[in-house]
Amino acid sequence: MEIDGGLPPESLAEALAGASAVITADGPAAHVAGAMGLRGIVVLPPDAPWQWGDRTEDTPFYPRLTTARSDRPDVWDGALQRISDLIATRLSQHGTAPPPRPVAPDQLLAETLDRVAPWLGGAHGPVECTPLAQGRRNLLFTIATPEGARLLRLPKFPPRRPDEHVIELHNMRRAAEAHVAPPVLYGDTLDGTLLTAPRDEVGALASDDLHDPAMASAAAGLYRHLHQTGGFRGRYDPMRRVEGLSRYLRRSGDSLFRRHDAERTLFEDVLAVLRANRVPRTSCHNVPVAKSFRGAVDTLALSGWEASGTDDPHWEVAALCARADLPAPVRDIYYATYLGDPDAPQACRLILWEAVTCWWRWMVAVDNLHDAPEDEDYQADADRWRARLDRRLEDSNFAKALEQARTYRHDGA
């Protein structure tokens, strides 16, 4: 039915009360429909007011409204085609079915399900949303849908940089095209809400899972493929982070750090050598921990792309080995899979980056202890990384790798 957009708000609300969806180019009618929680399409000119956002489809204030924008002033062909597509993909599939709602009442989750409903495989009514182990920055849920599980991420905090989620979403889509990340079904570049479709329902790995040679080899192959993928944006720069923490601890006068001052000099040399190798920055995930990997051996993929960017690729390969504490035989298989040749000249850099990772994690633990010296968990963390670092520094392969790396230069292979 057609409704006169010139009606006062209360009359508009009364007229819209029986509608299951709305298509309008009238601003007041769109705001009333959005406030009522109706599904709909708002037709906009290219210079639409700020409250409709600057994205192609989503609206910042009304999660159940979608926009169809014209490409040029007074040229509506593109907008009309988008309306036709949106009717087919977003409106017709829902009809009058009740919107998806979490089984356990949760307002934030309910509002988010409204936003991502078109990608929930026709799910409606009560939907099982299972919370997963939460990180410091995100809430994670597995959502059961008729088309399989979906993984939903809700950030707890605003982005640290204005373009953080823009870069993350761009990089994740590039990674998904290369089959090293799950397909991105929905991504909000303003608040970081993200919906993906895992390849299977196997959860995140634990460090012990990577002690299996087949799984370690699969992880190495995933990294190898990722580092051959171009087009990433942004940068993480692990060297700058390691050097910055070292300078901070030195200035703080921490007694535990000062007792190992010779190591600071050593690792300043190691980082200078690694930098002099002139290895080109490539696409990196930059969260080298076991739980970043999800799936079985043949469906493995990387999740959590907030830190992704272009960096030294060898750092994250070696860092995962150090953080998962791979046994020597598994480590050899892991590196051989990544390099393609266990005697490849760049193998020396992996050994050095392993030691740098252990030193970095030990410094993080020392910094935590400086603020909470009685914390037993921090002490255990410091002891664990101290043991891993000592083991690597005492290995004759470390000194040999450092000498080899002094003359290594990337040859473009």
Image (cartoon, grey):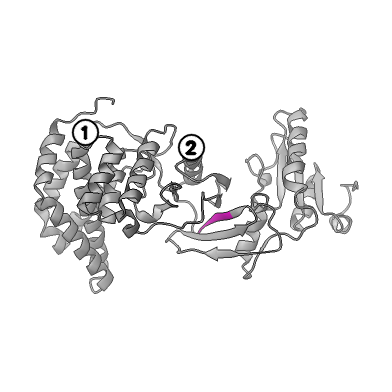
- Residue 66 location in percent, x, y? 71, 46
Q: Position of residue 90 (x, y in %)?
A: 72, 46
Tell me if 54 is positioned left or right of 89 in this view: left
Magenta stretch: residue 153 in it?
A: yes
Task: Report the magenta residues as a range.
Answer: 149-155
| Residue to which mark 1 is pinned | 344
Position of residue 27 relative to residue 229, above or below, is below
Which label lies toward us, 2 or 1?
A: 1
The quarter of the picture where the C terminus appears is: top left
Q: Is label 2 in a helix, a strand or a loop?
A: helix
Residue 346 inside the magenta-drawn segment: no
Q: How many marks?
A: 2
Label 1 element class: loop
Residue 174: assigned label: 2
Question: What amino acid is labelled 2 in the image?
Answer: Arg
Measured as percent of width and height from the top left, residue 327 is found at 22, 54
- Mark 2 and mark 1: span between their CA atoms? 28 Å
Residue 237 appearing in the image: yes
Seen at 17% across and 55% down, the residue is 389
Q: Amino acid at mark 1?
A: Ala
**Residue at 68 percent of width and 45 percent of height:** 52
Residue 122: which numbered mark, if any?
none
